Amino acid sequence: MSANRFRFWILVSIVAVSGFSQGMLLPLIAVIFENSGVSSFLNGVNATALYIGILLASPFMELPLRRYGYKPLIITGGFLVLVSLALFPLWQSFWFWFCLRLLVGMGDHALNFGAQTWITAFSPDHKRGRNIAVYGLFFGIGFAVGPLMVSLVEINESLPFIISACLTLLGWLFLFTLKNEWPEQNLQMSSFRNTFQRFAKAWKYAWIAFLPPFAYGFLETSLNGNFPVYALRIGMEVGNVSALLFAFAIGAIVFQLPLGMLSDKLGRRKILTAVLFLGFVCFLIAGFIEGTFIALFACLFIAGMFVGSMFSLGITYMTDLMPRELLPTGNLLCGVFFSLGSLIGPSIGGLYIQLLSQISFFYLVSALFLIIFIMTVRRNDKITQPL
């Protein structure tokens, strides 16, 4: 038991470091590019590089995991992130940073995919919801602290990258203390040729569980990548932007475990439907009160409490629906749909700010939650067995 606990805490710790680097990069580079005169659309396009990297790597993740085990995949992903973060200060260039974010996306995806699949595999049924909630909690803590590094730009633009690289190195070294394991295998699951057949089968079992990660990906990247640009254009100070992002992330942290436990009692489908609707309401209200910092701070904190657990709830719901041998595929697809949302978010958000500058940015986010809420309500009761 002590070995299992040690493994669990090492994995969630490296996930926290991953969350820190992602939470830092989105607003940090958005602010640096905005101060350098880069357009909001191109700023958003650059932010998509991380998620393009995730999508490009996704078809090639499952086979190495099944062949070499969890540990080598996580270590490789951590190394890619570490090297990329260390290279950012060398040259400030749109396309150089685009390529580095591409590599960060590939590395973070390998790290998170390996860690969350390992946790769902070794967690007993009665603790799975709690363990995944802790996984999401630690990622959220890292993601909440990351934007606070933005203010260090005023001291030195390289300082946030150096701090993040050092933290990644520390977490990466601890990974070598773990004993490697492999997921459950069968012959049909062990070839690249069958990858998309596994995707189709997993989709039929649990497609509804992939919608919350998609929505959260859109929210996370548009809020952290586009909102700083929007906020600066309506006259907010950089420090206040960091505080607002921190408020949302802290709200997600506060309610991560309670929502996970509540979903165990009431059912994940009901909780997911509720948080989608409450997210729609909160961001609609945020659009009306964005001129008042304290009110907006409180509103984003409450919104974080409701919707900040969507990714971990989606993973746990997927695990409930998916056959055990398809768990790696299901976890991979959760990451893919999160990445699709994350990829669409910055581009749409940047274009929205550029073309509809007089309409609150928060209405875009609110509309997304309303659409996915309607889809979830309409389809919920029809998804009980694979098609």
Image (cartoon, rainbow, N blue to C red):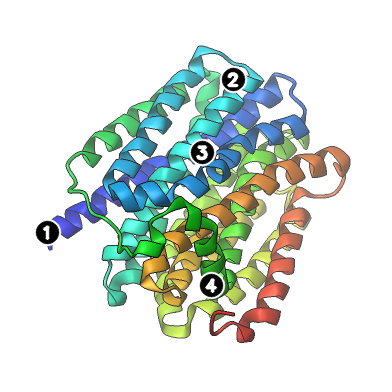
Give the mark toward the camera: 4 or 3. 4
Label 1 environment density (alpha carbons within 10 Å; few <14, some 14–19, many ≥20): few
Image quadrant containing the C terminus? bottom right
Coordinates of residue 62 in the picture (x, y in percent): 42, 52
Marks 3 and 1, how far apart in space? 32 Å
Coordinates of residue 318 in the picture (x, y in percent): 47, 70
Disc 4 + disc 3, Cβ < 8 Å: no
Marks 2 and 4, how far apart in space? 38 Å
Which of the labelled discs sits on residue 2, or is there none? 1
Which of the labelled discs sits on residue 96, or is there none? 2
Upstream in sequence: badge 4 or badge 3: 3
Amino acid type at image mark 2: Phe
- Per the image, label 1 sits on a secondary structure element best described as helix
Residue 142 seen in the figure? no
- Per the image, label 3 sits on a secondary structure element best described as helix
Which of the labelled discs sits on residue 105, or is there none? 3
How many labels sit on residues? 4
